[in-house]
Image (spheres, rainbow, N blue to C red):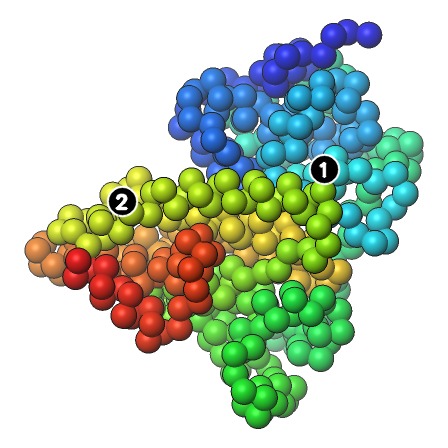
Amino acid sequence: MATPALNFVAVCANASLPVQGNKNQYLKSLKDSGASIGSAQSLPDIKERFAALTWVRHAVANAIDPATWSATLSAPLLDYLRSLYPIPPARPDAPAGETDLHRLAHMVSLFIPAALPAASTTSAPAPAATSSGGINTTRPSSSQQAPASASTASPAPQPAPTVTNSAGKKRWLMHDELHALLPDAVYTALDANAHLPAEKRFKLQEACKKSSTSALYDPATGAPFGHQLQLTLAEGAHFDPVKRGLALAIAGRSAGPESPTAASLIEATGRRSVLFEFRTHWAAIEAELGGTHELSGTNVDRLWEGVAFVMQARAARATAWGCPEVELACKEQFEAIPAYRTAVATSVSRAASALPARDAARWVNSAYLSFFLPFWWEHVLLRSRLEDTEAARVSKEILCQ
């Protein structure tokens, strides 16, 4: 048996999987795929991370059983592979023989775009080449997949049936239905109105039973549950950074597993490490927001990266909550972030262009601060939940420093 390669660049070379590109291309591919960049900074480190993503996406796309990955990868490379995505804990009803690598494979499959060509599931910066070394770069049809692989790999959960009305609008599960399906901690985290007194909550629940939620709420700025919020900004729609920022914070809420399993402890440790890295940048971001110059592209990138990291971890957690509708919604919210980012930037830029030059930078900073502050304050800085009045007070302090 051949000696396993020492790194993923070599593994991909042995399998003729393309990893050519530059640093910016690697970073974009990793961000677009939702993979964790970790502490990688240098070009070789980032290329290695991209190569790991390239290998695992091909393995998953071609139904290569995770139980066989150790024949190609050494133990250190398997550990490195596990760091690409937060791995959810095992479900109580998990199939016999399921390992953390099977759950990792499911996570990878969630973030492979459905529209991506079968010959290239890597978001590679270079055109796909014909592979060798035991990994086929063509996605097989269901009839071509080996029965042995299907018997050992963890089956992907079936999506919940989508219930729509005659106008094609989705009918969401509501309070009693979700409460019966979700763990209590998850239900409370997703409930956008958990802070209301019982009397008001009862009236709200009765209203949701009688009317479509879209008739009661603007789905971009309000919804009964966080997973029901739509991270979209239609062309010509008004961008209210305060309302959308508070909604984004609600959309980021989730709950981890209650039992201290190995997987949950690994997730918590990795999460703390990444959040600490984001927090080291906050002082510079805060100072720039309160300055006279427009927030730099680098710091805008960091703010969005913080959002993407939290939303990706939330989508991973949702796979263990036992509610396919919520799992799918959390995944769709995470996948909506790139388009949402583009729409928000366009709206902010358009509004700023109508202002005098001396006021434009200040308005841009104020808009971005109002939008990102509730999310970062709660989910990245881990300080507290900010309601509208308190968020306005903190924003004013930062802008007037």
Q: Which quadrant of the view contains residue 61?
A: top right
From the top left corner, tell me how far across and down residue 299 is, in percent: 31, 44
Asked if residue 349 lies left or right of residue 91, the reply is left
Q: Residue at x 74, y 57 (%)?
A: 159
Q: Which of the two residues, 144 or 283, is positioned nearer the viewer here?
A: 283
Q: Residue at x 80, y 38 (%)?
A: 99
Please name the residue that numbered disc 1 is placed on.
105
Q: Which quadrant of the view contains residue 362?
A: bottom left
Q: Are marks 1 and 2 in contact (CB under 8 Å)?
A: no
- Count neighbours of disc 1 (C-alpha within 10 A) and say few if under 14, some if 14 to 19, many if 20 or more: many
- Mark 1 vs 2, N-terminal side: 1
From the top left corner, tell me how far across and down residue 123 is, in percent: 55, 32
Asked if residue 150 lies left or right of residue 17, the reply is right
Q: Is residue 198 above or below residue 274?
A: below
Q: Give the structural element (helix, strand or loop) at label 2.
A: helix
Q: Is residue 19 above or below residue 301?
A: above
Q: Residue at x 71, y 66 (%)?
A: 183
Amino acid at pointer 1: Ala
Residue that protrudes farthest toward the top in the picture? 2
Please name the residue that numbered disc 2 is placed on.
284
Quarter of the image with the C terminus is bottom left
Asked if residue 128 lies left or right of residue 296, the reply is right
Closer to the observer: label 1 or label 2? 2
Q: Which of the two residues, 298 or 133, is positioned nearer the viewer here?
A: 298
From the top left corner, tell me how far across and down residue 177 is, in percent: 73, 76
Amino acid at pointer 2: Ala
From the top left corner, tell me how far across and down residue 234 is, in percent: 41, 63
Q: Is residue 254 above or below residue 192?
A: above
